[in-house]
Image (tube, helix red, strand yellow):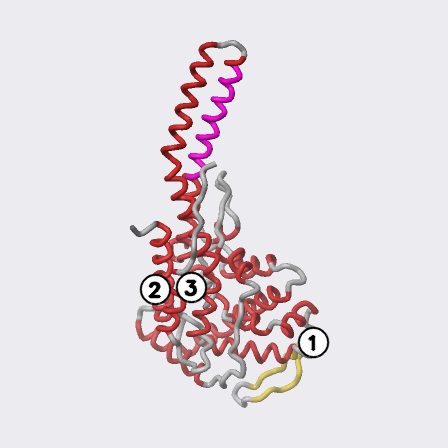
Amino acid sequence: MTSKNQCTRRLGAALMAATVTLGATTVAQAWKPETHVYLAEEARKDALDGSVSIHQADFWGNSLKGLLNDYKVREDILSALKTYPQYYRAGVLGPDAYPDLMFGQQTIHPEKNPRGADAWLDLLWRSKQPGNAAQVAFVTGFLVHAAGDSFAHTLVNDYAGGPFTITPIDNAKTHLIVEGYLGKKVPPLVDYSIDTDLVNGFIYDTLINADRSRSGVGNEIWNLTESTWGMSIPGIYTRLREGLEDRIDYHYRRIAAMRADVIRLASECKGGSASACLKAGGKKILLEGYKVLVSPLLMYMEAWVDDINRGLRAWPRASTEVARKIFVNPSRKGDFEGANTTASRLLASRSVAPGRVR
């Protein structure tokens, strides 16, 4: 018999595969990921001497004119750029890759909350731990992606005749042509390496783990995904998890209330109340019977929640493996079949531990 946990893992793997396929065909990027990474690498190399130089540009003459200003790089950012360039490059892929392609396109890129993408950038910046160079590198890269989009969307929209739309189809085609042209003009990357091993937990905590208290108060991710959760796989599974935890809590609260009644009546029984003794015995029988009835259900739901948690925590690693295959592939061609295979293997291999009735 196929367990709920096996079904959850298989569904998660299938949905990640769908994310890779659908995301690759529907994403409205300002420019190609390798363009993002190449330009970000140029900015990183410029920053390694401790400052970033901004020149006046002659775009038609293809040259730089006078220096406008030098900007000092913060010490923590400079150290992170030197120590963890692969984490910076992963961050530069930004919401095109993290927490996954569809989440980024449907939840982070669009203005579907009052503060738009800035709310997510602000959350990332505030959540990084001081002194954690890997987190600083990743978040800095994510912000660089946003800065690149701010310029690139304006540039591409100008040549394409307006913002990206699926209809009319000519607009979408023009966008793809302009983006593809820019991508072909990008020199090959010297270093394609990306990594997130040290920040996968951070990505989970700041971009995936939509959670709320049993009183209904949600954390920032819960609130920011209020209107978009149904369009992202992490959103669907975090909401499913909360519903399961509500049902689990209900049963444990009921068991606790029944146990309290037994204890109260037993105390009255010791005080000499015969009716309390009878009631205590009856309540004890009901309590034990209820525990026997709900025990399999609670173990089932707790194992399901545990499986969801394991899958969501594996999500950033799977997203990195997908990004390696389709975004920063040295061949400069997306290996979508390889990405699907890798993501399915990673997500389908999550193991679970059964819960225990308290």
The residue segment tinted magenta is 248-268
Is residue 70 or residue 241 the one in the foreground? 241
Is residue 175 or residue 348 the one in the foreground? 348
Considering only order in the chain, which callout, 1 or 3, is on the residue closer to the N terminus?
1
Choose mark 3 or mark 1, whichever is in front: 3
Identify the element where label 1 is drawn: loop
Q: CA distance from mark 1 to mark 2?
A: 43 Å
Q: Look at label 1 and name its amino acid.
A: Gly
Residue at x 37%, y 51% (from the top left corner): 5
Q: Look at label 2 and name its amino acid.
A: Ala
- Residue 189 vertical placement versus 235 (above, below): below
323 falls in the magenta region? no
Which residue is identified by label 3?
346
Q: CA distance from mark 2 to mark 3?
A: 15 Å
Q: Residues within 10 Å of mark 3 (few under 14, many from 20)?
A: some
Choose mark 2 or mark 3, whichever is in front: 3
- Magenta span dominant secondary structure: helix
Considering only order in the chain, which callout, 3 or 2, is on the residue closer to the N terminus?
2
Which residue is identified by label 2?
18
Can residue 217 be seen in the rendering of this structure?
Answer: yes
256 falls in the magenta region? yes
Identify the element where label 2 is drawn: helix
Q: Look at label 3 and name its amino acid.
A: Leu
Is residue 263 or residue 67 the one in the foreground? 263
Residue 39 appears in which quarter of the rendering? Answer: bottom right
Which residue is identified by label 1?
50
Residue at x 59%, y 61% (from the top left corner): 125
Q: Are marks 3 and 1 in contact (CB under 8 Å)?
A: no
Choose mark 1 or mark 2, whichever is in front: 2
Q: Looking at the picture, how far across and down is residue 284, in whole percent?
A: 43, 23
Q: Residues within 10 Å of mark 2 (few under 14, many from 20)?
A: some
Q: Looking at the picture, how far across and down is residue 336, in whole percent?
A: 37, 73
